[in-house]
Image (cartoon, rainbow, N blue to C red):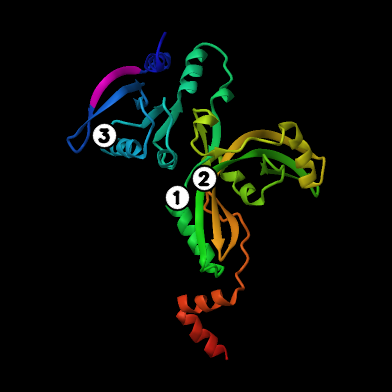
Amino acid sequence: MKGIREKLIDILKTYNYKIYEKIDLKGRSGLSYAVDIYAIREDPFSSTKIVFMIPEQVITKDLILDLKIIYSDVPDIDQIVVVCTKGIDKEAYTLAESGEKIILMDEQAVERLHQRKGKKVKEEEFEIYTLKLSVLDKDAREILKNTLYGKKWFTSHLIDLELMYRPFYLVYVAVKLHNKITFTGIMIDGITGEVSKEHSELAVKVPILMKKKIYSVSTIPYEVIDFKVPEDKIEKIVELWFDTKEFEIFQIQKIYVPIWVAELDARGKKFRIEICGTTGQVLTEIPENKDPVNKVLYYIYNPDKIIELLLKK
Protein backbone atom coordinates (compact mmCIF):
# COMPACT_ATOMS: atom_id res chain seq x y z
CA MET A 1 0.00 0.00 0.00
CA LYS A 2 1.39 3.39 -1.01
CA GLY A 3 2.21 5.94 1.68
CA ILE A 4 1.75 9.72 1.65
CA ARG A 5 5.09 10.36 -0.05
CA GLU A 6 4.46 7.90 -2.87
CA LYS A 7 0.95 9.24 -3.46
CA LEU A 8 2.23 12.81 -3.60
CA ILE A 9 4.82 11.80 -6.16
CA ASP A 10 2.14 10.07 -8.25
CA ILE A 11 0.00 13.24 -8.17
CA LEU A 12 2.91 15.50 -9.13
CA LYS A 13 3.95 13.24 -12.00
CA THR A 14 0.39 13.46 -13.32
CA TYR A 15 0.95 17.20 -13.65
CA ASN A 16 4.33 16.68 -15.35
CA TYR A 17 6.53 17.69 -12.42
CA LYS A 18 10.11 16.48 -12.27
CA ILE A 19 10.70 15.00 -8.82
CA TYR A 20 13.75 15.14 -6.54
CA GLU A 21 13.51 13.26 -3.25
CA LYS A 22 15.44 13.83 -0.03
CA ILE A 23 17.77 16.50 -1.41
CA ASP A 24 19.59 19.51 0.03
CA LEU A 25 18.83 22.97 -1.34
CA LYS A 26 21.53 25.61 -1.01
CA GLY A 27 20.58 29.10 0.16
CA ARG A 28 22.07 32.49 -0.58
CA SER A 29 23.66 32.39 2.87
CA GLY A 30 25.67 29.29 1.94
CA LEU A 31 23.59 27.08 4.25
CA SER A 32 22.00 23.88 2.95
CA TYR A 33 18.49 22.73 3.82
CA ALA A 34 17.18 19.17 3.64
CA VAL A 35 13.72 18.85 2.03
CA ASP A 36 11.52 15.81 1.48
CA ILE A 37 10.41 16.51 -2.10
CA TYR A 38 11.48 19.20 -4.57
CA ALA A 39 9.15 19.35 -7.56
CA ILE A 40 9.85 21.34 -10.74
CA ARG A 41 7.62 21.94 -13.75
CA GLU A 42 8.96 23.98 -16.65
CA ASP A 43 7.64 25.11 -20.00
CA PRO A 44 8.89 27.66 -22.56
CA PHE A 45 7.11 30.50 -20.72
CA SER A 46 7.36 29.77 -17.00
CA SER A 47 8.56 27.44 -14.27
CA THR A 48 7.10 26.33 -10.94
CA LYS A 49 9.26 25.05 -8.10
CA ILE A 50 7.61 23.62 -4.99
CA VAL A 51 9.05 22.12 -1.81
CA PHE A 52 7.03 19.46 0.01
CA MET A 53 7.70 18.71 3.67
CA ILE A 54 6.12 15.68 5.36
CA PRO A 55 6.89 15.94 9.10
CA GLU A 56 6.13 12.84 11.16
CA GLN A 57 5.19 14.86 14.23
CA VAL A 58 2.78 17.65 15.17
CA ILE A 59 3.66 20.79 13.21
CA THR A 60 4.92 23.48 15.58
CA LYS A 61 5.62 27.20 15.36
CA ASP A 62 9.37 26.48 15.25
CA LEU A 63 8.96 24.30 12.17
CA ILE A 64 6.96 27.00 10.35
CA LEU A 65 9.60 29.59 11.28
CA ASP A 66 12.31 27.29 9.91
CA LEU A 67 10.36 26.93 6.66
CA LYS A 68 10.02 30.70 6.36
CA ILE A 69 13.81 30.95 6.68
CA ILE A 70 14.25 28.33 3.94
CA TYR A 71 11.84 30.20 1.67
CA SER A 72 13.62 33.53 2.16
CA ASP A 73 17.10 32.04 1.76
CA VAL A 74 16.68 29.62 -1.14
CA PRO A 75 16.14 31.50 -4.44
CA ASP A 76 14.46 28.69 -6.38
CA ILE A 77 11.27 28.11 -4.34
CA ASP A 78 7.83 29.35 -5.33
CA GLN A 79 5.90 27.66 -2.52
CA ILE A 80 6.37 25.30 0.40
CA VAL A 81 3.65 22.72 1.04
CA VAL A 82 3.51 21.14 4.50
CA VAL A 83 1.54 17.92 4.83
CA CYS A 84 -0.12 17.56 8.25
CA THR A 85 0.17 13.90 9.20
CA LYS A 86 0.00 14.32 12.99
CA GLY A 87 -1.82 17.64 13.25
CA ILE A 88 -0.71 21.25 13.78
CA ASP A 89 -0.66 23.42 16.89
CA LYS A 90 -2.42 26.79 17.12
CA GLU A 91 0.63 29.06 16.93
CA ALA A 92 1.96 27.20 13.90
CA TYR A 93 -1.41 27.37 12.17
CA THR A 94 -1.85 31.15 12.57
CA LEU A 95 1.75 31.75 11.49
CA ALA A 96 1.36 29.60 8.37
CA GLU A 97 -2.05 31.01 7.44
CA SER A 98 -0.95 34.64 7.77
CA GLY A 99 1.66 34.21 5.03
CA GLU A 100 1.37 33.60 1.31
CA LYS A 101 4.03 31.06 0.46
CA ILE A 102 3.49 28.27 3.00
CA ILE A 103 0.53 26.03 2.19
CA LEU A 104 -0.97 23.48 4.56
CA MET A 105 -2.31 20.17 3.28
CA ASP A 106 -3.65 17.12 5.09
CA GLU A 107 -3.61 13.39 4.44
CA GLN A 108 -7.26 13.39 3.39
CA ALA A 109 -6.49 15.88 0.63
CA VAL A 110 -3.56 13.79 -0.58
CA GLU A 111 -5.76 10.69 -0.61
CA ARG A 112 -8.58 12.37 -2.51
CA LEU A 113 -6.22 14.00 -5.02
CA HIS A 114 -4.62 10.61 -5.59
CA GLN A 115 -8.03 9.05 -6.22
CA ARG A 116 -8.96 11.91 -8.53
CA LYS A 117 -6.26 11.13 -11.05
CA GLY A 118 -8.27 10.76 -14.23
CA LYS A 119 -11.54 10.61 -12.28
CA LYS A 120 -14.28 12.96 -11.12
CA VAL A 121 -14.03 13.51 -7.37
CA LYS A 122 -15.89 16.13 -5.34
CA GLU A 123 -13.31 18.67 -4.22
CA GLU A 124 -15.60 19.86 -1.43
CA GLU A 125 -14.74 16.68 0.47
CA PHE A 126 -11.31 18.04 1.29
CA GLU A 127 -11.24 21.68 0.19
CA ILE A 128 -12.59 24.63 2.15
CA TYR A 129 -12.53 28.37 1.61
CA THR A 130 -11.57 30.93 4.24
CA LEU A 131 -10.87 34.63 4.28
CA LYS A 132 -7.20 35.42 4.74
CA LEU A 133 -5.97 35.56 8.34
CA SER A 134 -4.22 38.95 8.44
CA VAL A 135 -4.60 39.79 12.14
CA LEU A 136 -2.39 37.73 14.45
CA ASP A 137 -2.75 37.33 18.21
CA LYS A 138 -0.50 40.31 19.01
CA ASP A 139 -2.38 42.49 16.50
CA ALA A 140 -5.75 41.54 18.01
CA ARG A 141 -4.47 42.43 21.49
CA GLU A 142 -3.30 45.84 20.30
CA ILE A 143 -6.62 46.54 18.56
CA LEU A 144 -8.46 45.47 21.69
CA LYS A 145 -6.31 47.67 23.91
CA ASN A 146 -6.81 50.76 21.73
CA THR A 147 -10.55 50.16 21.41
CA LEU A 148 -11.10 49.73 25.15
CA TYR A 149 -8.89 52.75 25.86
CA GLY A 150 -10.94 54.86 23.49
CA LYS A 151 -14.16 53.83 25.27
CA LYS A 152 -12.64 54.53 28.74
CA TRP A 153 -12.57 50.88 29.84
CA PHE A 154 -9.24 51.35 31.65
CA THR A 155 -9.84 48.77 34.41
CA SER A 156 -10.91 45.93 32.10
CA HIS A 157 -8.91 42.70 32.28
CA LEU A 158 -8.45 40.27 29.39
CA ILE A 159 -9.43 36.77 30.49
CA ASP A 160 -9.01 34.95 27.21
CA LEU A 161 -8.39 35.62 23.52
CA GLU A 162 -9.13 32.82 21.08
CA LEU A 163 -9.51 32.48 17.32
CA MET A 164 -12.55 30.82 15.79
CA TYR A 165 -13.90 30.39 12.27
CA ARG A 166 -17.48 31.50 11.66
CA PRO A 167 -19.41 30.21 8.60
CA PHE A 168 -20.81 32.60 6.01
CA TYR A 169 -22.49 32.34 2.63
CA LEU A 170 -20.94 34.66 0.07
CA VAL A 171 -23.73 35.51 -2.37
CA TYR A 172 -23.31 37.42 -5.64
CA VAL A 173 -26.59 38.71 -7.01
CA ALA A 174 -28.05 40.96 -9.71
CA VAL A 175 -31.00 42.86 -8.25
CA LYS A 176 -33.44 45.28 -9.84
CA LEU A 177 -34.01 48.34 -7.68
CA HIS A 178 -35.77 51.52 -8.85
CA ASN A 179 -35.79 50.22 -12.45
CA LYS A 180 -32.04 49.77 -12.37
CA ILE A 181 -30.10 46.50 -12.24
CA THR A 182 -27.30 46.44 -9.69
CA PHE A 183 -24.68 43.73 -9.34
CA THR A 184 -23.58 43.28 -5.74
CA GLY A 185 -22.42 40.81 -3.14
CA ILE A 186 -23.57 40.10 0.40
CA MET A 187 -22.33 37.89 3.24
CA ILE A 188 -24.96 35.88 5.11
CA ASP A 189 -24.15 34.49 8.55
CA GLY A 190 -24.29 30.70 8.29
CA ILE A 191 -25.50 30.41 11.89
CA THR A 192 -28.16 33.11 12.22
CA GLY A 193 -29.13 33.65 8.58
CA GLU A 194 -28.67 37.40 9.00
CA VAL A 195 -26.92 39.56 6.40
CA SER A 196 -23.68 40.90 7.89
CA LYS A 197 -23.25 44.56 6.93
CA GLU A 198 -19.66 44.57 8.19
CA HIS A 199 -18.61 41.55 6.16
CA SER A 200 -20.75 42.42 3.13
CA GLU A 201 -18.44 45.39 2.61
CA LEU A 202 -15.72 42.82 1.90
CA ALA A 203 -17.73 41.07 -0.81
CA VAL A 204 -16.06 42.98 -3.65
CA LYS A 205 -12.62 42.18 -2.20
CA VAL A 206 -13.29 38.50 -1.49
CA PRO A 207 -11.66 37.23 -4.72
CA ILE A 208 -8.39 38.70 -3.35
CA LEU A 209 -8.92 37.82 0.31
CA MET A 210 -10.39 34.35 -0.17
CA LYS A 211 -8.01 31.42 0.05
CA LYS A 212 -8.73 27.85 -0.96
CA LYS A 213 -7.46 25.35 1.60
CA ILE A 214 -6.50 21.85 0.61
CA TYR A 215 -7.43 20.31 3.91
CA SER A 216 -10.58 19.42 5.80
CA VAL A 217 -12.17 21.50 8.56
CA SER A 218 -10.98 19.01 11.17
CA THR A 219 -7.34 20.00 10.49
CA ILE A 220 -7.91 23.54 11.83
CA PRO A 221 -6.75 23.55 15.48
CA TYR A 222 -9.33 26.19 16.44
CA GLU A 223 -13.09 26.04 16.85
CA VAL A 224 -14.85 25.92 13.48
CA ILE A 225 -18.58 26.50 13.75
CA ASP A 226 -20.80 24.41 11.48
CA PHE A 227 -23.36 25.89 9.10
CA LYS A 228 -26.83 25.94 10.68
CA VAL A 229 -28.69 27.68 7.85
CA PRO A 230 -29.32 25.36 4.86
CA GLU A 231 -28.36 26.64 1.42
CA ASP A 232 -31.92 26.36 0.13
CA LYS A 233 -32.91 29.21 2.49
CA ILE A 234 -30.54 31.70 0.85
CA GLU A 235 -32.95 32.80 -1.89
CA LYS A 236 -35.60 33.79 0.66
CA ILE A 237 -33.02 35.69 2.75
CA VAL A 238 -31.90 37.64 -0.34
CA GLU A 239 -35.53 38.44 -1.18
CA LEU A 240 -36.19 39.80 2.32
CA TRP A 241 -32.93 41.75 2.42
CA PHE A 242 -33.54 43.62 -0.85
CA ASP A 243 -37.33 43.62 -0.40
CA THR A 244 -37.93 42.47 -3.96
CA LYS A 245 -38.36 39.31 -5.98
CA GLU A 246 -36.63 40.81 -8.99
CA PHE A 247 -33.16 39.40 -8.56
CA GLU A 248 -30.94 36.63 -9.87
CA ILE A 249 -28.34 34.80 -7.80
CA PHE A 250 -25.15 34.13 -9.74
CA GLN A 251 -23.02 32.41 -7.11
CA ILE A 252 -23.30 31.03 -3.60
CA GLN A 253 -20.02 30.12 -1.91
CA LYS A 254 -19.55 28.70 1.57
CA ILE A 255 -16.70 30.49 3.32
CA TYR A 256 -15.22 30.59 6.82
CA VAL A 257 -14.19 33.92 8.35
CA PRO A 258 -11.53 34.10 11.09
CA ILE A 259 -12.84 35.91 14.18
CA TRP A 260 -10.85 36.75 17.32
CA VAL A 261 -13.04 36.41 20.40
CA ALA A 262 -11.95 38.25 23.56
CA GLU A 263 -13.44 37.50 26.98
CA LEU A 264 -13.00 40.43 29.38
CA ASP A 265 -13.73 41.34 32.97
CA ALA A 266 -14.34 44.94 34.04
CA ARG A 267 -14.66 45.16 37.82
CA GLY A 268 -16.75 41.99 37.97
CA LYS A 269 -18.70 42.62 34.78
CA LYS A 270 -17.84 40.09 32.08
CA PHE A 271 -18.31 40.81 28.40
CA ARG A 272 -17.18 39.56 25.00
CA ILE A 273 -15.71 41.42 22.02
CA GLU A 274 -15.24 40.04 18.50
CA ILE A 275 -12.59 41.26 16.04
CA CYS A 276 -12.46 40.28 12.36
CA GLY A 277 -9.27 38.31 11.75
CA THR A 278 -9.11 39.58 8.16
CA THR A 279 -9.66 43.33 8.51
CA GLY A 280 -9.08 43.98 12.21
CA GLN A 281 -12.50 45.61 12.45
CA VAL A 282 -14.14 45.44 15.89
CA LEU A 283 -17.47 43.69 15.26
CA THR A 284 -18.96 44.25 18.72
CA GLU A 285 -20.56 47.56 19.62
CA ILE A 286 -18.82 48.77 22.78
CA PRO A 287 -20.56 51.46 24.85
CA GLU A 288 -18.52 54.21 26.48
CA ASN A 289 -17.80 53.52 30.13
CA LYS A 290 -19.70 56.00 32.35
CA ASP A 291 -18.16 54.78 35.63
CA PRO A 292 -16.81 57.86 37.58
CA VAL A 293 -13.62 55.94 38.42
CA ASN A 294 -12.86 55.52 34.73
CA LYS A 295 -13.49 59.21 34.14
CA VAL A 296 -10.75 60.03 36.64
CA LEU A 297 -8.45 57.47 35.02
CA TYR A 298 -9.17 59.00 31.61
CA TYR A 299 -7.73 62.36 32.72
CA ILE A 300 -4.79 60.63 34.40
CA TYR A 301 -3.95 58.89 31.12
CA ASN A 302 -4.65 62.07 29.13
CA PRO A 303 -3.33 65.09 31.09
CA ASP A 304 -3.71 67.31 28.01
CA LYS A 305 -7.48 66.78 28.25
CA ILE A 306 -7.47 68.49 31.68
CA ILE A 307 -6.16 71.66 30.03
CA GLU A 308 -8.86 71.44 27.34
CA LEU A 309 -11.49 71.02 30.04
CA LEU A 310 -10.22 74.06 32.01
CA LEU A 311 -10.11 76.21 28.88
CA LYS A 312 -13.73 75.37 28.12
CA LYS A 313 -14.67 76.65 31.54
Nearer to us in this view, 297 or 54: 297
How many other residues sit within 10 Å of disc 3, few (<14), some (14-19) or many (≥20)? some
Q: Secondary structure at mark 3?
A: loop
Q: Rounded to the nearest whole Å, what is the CA distance between mark 2 and mark 1?
A: 8 Å
How many other residues sit within 10 Å of disc 2, few (<14), some (14-19) or many (≥20)? many
x, y percent for residue 45: 37, 25
Residue drawn at the location 50% of the way across and 42% of the way down: 132
Asked which quadrant contains residue 47, the reply is top left
x, y percent for residue 217: 54, 31
Which residue is labeled 1 in the image?
A: 137
Residue 196 falls left or right of residue 107: right
Q: Earlier in the sequence, mark 2 or mark 1?
A: 1
User: Which disc number belongs to residue 74?
Assistant: 3
User: Which disc number belongs to residue 163?
Assistant: 2
Q: Amino acid at mark 3?
A: Val
Q: Nearer the viewer, mark 3 or mark 2?
A: 2
